[in-house]
Image (tube, grey):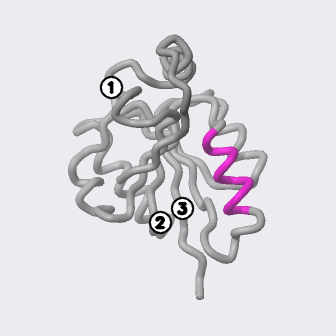
Amino acid sequence: MKPAGLAVLASGGGTNLQALLDRFNGEAAEVARVELVIASRSGIGALDRAATAGVSTAVVDPRAHAEGGGPELLRVLTDHRIDIVILAGYLHLIPGEVVERFRGRMLNVHPALLPAFGGVGMYGMRVHRAVIESGARVSGATVHQ
């Protein structure tokens, strides 16, 4: 059976991407492989991590494309025959046509437990600071559709 082709959308340094690369392009490669990394802007660490791993990359800046980049995202995902989309530190809304095409095959990785530490501005180190400042005794990550 062919491994599922994963696309990871990222907007920053790519630490979540690195964990996915380590797992799915390593010991779990028979299940799924990261085939594509799509960045929301050029020059970010996620692109460097993808290049180091030999993974194809694309930059689709939703601010620079009509309709939030939806048609361009769909084109790139289709061209690479992607099965599952993973949002790992991606800081933009996903256009409706992309959500519809990948319904049930799109996951978001959030670096804290939702709904306690989510919402506007809750990304990167801001999330971790909020968890610590709250005095929470338990923390974790949330993966959801």
Which residue is found at the position 46% from the left and 43% from the top? 142
Q: Residue at x 29, y 50 (%)?
A: 71
Element at label 2: loop
**Residue that numbered label 2 is attached to:** 82
Residue 6 circle label: 3
Q: Is residue 106 magenta?
A: no
Nearer mark to the viewer, of 3 and 1:
1
Mark 2 vs 3: CB contact within 8 A = yes
Front-lying residue, 108 or 7: 108
The N terminus: image quadrant: bottom right
- x%, y% of residue 74? 35, 56
Q: Amino acid at mark 1?
A: Gly
Is 1 located above or below residue 5 in the figure? below
Of labels 2 and 3, earlier in sequence is: 3
Q: Please report whichever mark, 3 or 1, sits nearer to the chain's N-terminal start.
A: 3
Q: Nearer the viewer, mark 2 or mark 1?
A: 1
The residue drawn where x is 42% and y is 53% is: 107
Residue extent of the magenta highlight:
16-25
Q: CA distance from mark 3 to mark 1?
A: 26 Å
| In this picture, residue 15 sits left or right of residue 92 | right
Q: Which residue is mark 1?
A: 119
Q: Amino acid at mark 3?
A: Leu
- Mark 2 nearby-residue class (10 Å; few <14, some 14–19, many ≥20): many
C-alpha separation, residue under disc 2 versus residue under disc 3: 6 Å
